Image: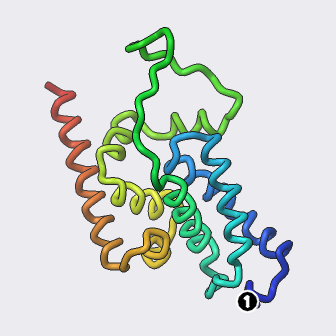
Amino acid sequence: MSLRAVSARAFIEQALEYLPALRRVGRRLTGSAAEADDLVQETVARALERRGELRDPERLKGWLLAVQRTVYLNSRRGLRPRLEVLAGGLGQERPREPSADLEEELHARSLSSGMKAALESLAPEWRDALWLREVEELSYEEIAQVQGCPVGTVRSRLARARLAMLEHLEKEKVHGSL
C-alpha cells in the first residue's frame, strides 16, 4: 500500500518507528539534545506535509533522514558564526555534570575519546556517511538519498572515512606509546 493513500494518522504511526534514528542523527547534526528534538519535530511536520512524495514505502527511514537533512540545512542558511562570551569561567572547562537525560549521557559515553577524536577529524560528508552506515545501518542507496549524491560518491566517502579513521587511530596509538 502506498503512503500516498494513507491518512496522516497512519503515516505518523509508521514514522514513529524511526524517531530514535531521527533523534540520533539530529544530535549528530546539531550537537544538542534540545536542538535535535526541535529538528525532529520540524522533520516530522515537513514529512507529513510531503508524504505524497515518498515513492517507495520500504525506504521510509532513508526518506525521513533526507527530509531531516534538508530541514537542517535550510535552518542553517544565512547563519553566521558568532562568538559568545559568557561571564565568569572564561578559558575554564567545567567537568561534565550528570543530566536528567539518560540518552544524552549514554551518547556522550558511547565512544572512546580516541574514536570521538578520529570521527570528529573527518570531513563532515565522510563523517555523516560513516555514521549513517555504521550506526543507522542505512544501505548505500539510502545514504545517497539522504546526502543527495550518487551511490558511487557514498562508496568513496565511506572508503575514505574508514581509511582516515584507521590512520588517525594508528597515529594516536604511536604517539600514546612514546
Please determine whether, in this image, residue 35 is positioned above or below residue 20.
above
Image spot of residue 19 (x, y percent): 69, 58
Residue 36 spot, x, y in % from top left: 61, 48
Q: Position of residue 24 (x, y in %)?
A: 58, 51
Q: Is residue 124 above or below residue 51?
A: above
Residue at 31% across, 74% down: 153
Q: How many marks?
A: 1
Locate residue 82 relative to residue 8 in the image: left or right: left
The residue sitting at the left extreme is 178
Quarter of the figure with the C terminus: top left
Hey, what amino acid is under mark 1? Ser
The image quadrant of residue 5 is bottom right
Give x and y (percent) for residue 80.
42, 44
Residue hosting label 1: 2
Point 67% across, 35% down: residue: 102
In this rendering, is residue 44 above or below 171? below
